[in-house]
């Protein structure tokens, strides 16, 4: 169930999305509310599940993950629940989306290089029971994430 958010809540979410390390004092100053009000609003947004957590924005290239790709999958529908757990356990899988359209699942994967990507797709993903086909879309360049993106 969605909760009501007002303009101050939206400002708080925008500020925390831009910098999740903001102190409550700085946050309160930026949105022009008291610290107590900022604390209360952030707590309410967290308890309601609007704020799911705070993360570091990590540069994959700095970790040696120089290859990024989207891998689409077609699968037998009754395998989705068991496939999801297996896909989540694979090294390099960053995001999984069950989608509608010409394919069933889209994965965002990050690997050291194309060879590691090849092994992930051909030796691991394609060998999972229920995966019918895969298609790999290599990402050549990634701009800075938009506000709120991972």
Image (cartoon, helix red, strand yellow):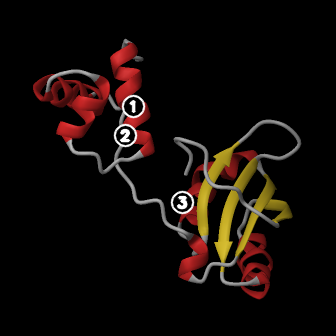
Distance from label 1 to label 2 (Cα)? 5 Å
- Residue at screen point 61% across, 66% down: 93
Mark 3 or mark 2: whose residue is earlier in sequence? 2
The residue at the point 75 percent across, 79 percent down is 117
At label 2, counting other C-alpha atoms closer than 10 Å, the crowd grade (few under 14, some 14-19, many 20 or more) is some
Q: Image quadrant for the N terminus? A: top left
Residue placed at 69% from the left, 47% from the top? Answer: 78
x%, y% of residue 2?
Answer: 42, 17
| Side of 30 relative to 128 (left or right) | left
Residue 59 in view of the camera: yes
Q: Is residue 5 visible?
A: no
Q: Nearer the viewer, residue 75 or 103?
A: 103
Indicate the quadrant where residue 125 lies.
bottom right
Report the disc number at residue 13.
Answer: 1
Q: Secondary structure at mark 1?
A: helix
Considering every residue shown, the one lying at the far left of the view is 36
Identify the image quadrant of residue 144: bottom right
Residue at x 67%, y 66% (from the top left corner): 109
The residue beneath circle 2 is 16
The vertical placement of 88 against 5, above or below, is below
In the image, is residue 3 above or below residue 69? Answer: above
């Amino acid at each position: 169930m969605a909760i009501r958010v007002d303009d101050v809540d939206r400002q708080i979410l925008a500020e925390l999305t831009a910098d999740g390390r903001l102190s409550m004092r700085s946050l309160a100053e930026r949105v022009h509310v008291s610290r107590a009000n900022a604390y209360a609003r952030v707590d309410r947004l967290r308890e309601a599940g609007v704020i799911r957590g705070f993360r570091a924005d990590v540069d994959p290239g700095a970790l040696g993950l120089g290859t990024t790709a989207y891998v689409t999958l077609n699968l037998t529908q009754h395998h989705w629940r068991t496939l999801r757990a297996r896909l989540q356990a694979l090294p390099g899988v960053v995001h999984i989306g069950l989608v509608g359209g010409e394919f069933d699942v889209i994965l965002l994967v990050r690997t050291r290089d194309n060879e590691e990507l090849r092994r992930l797709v051909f030796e691991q993903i394609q060998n999972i029971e229920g995966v019918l086909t895969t298609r790999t879309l290599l990402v050549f360049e990634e701009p800075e994430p938009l506000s709120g993106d991972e």
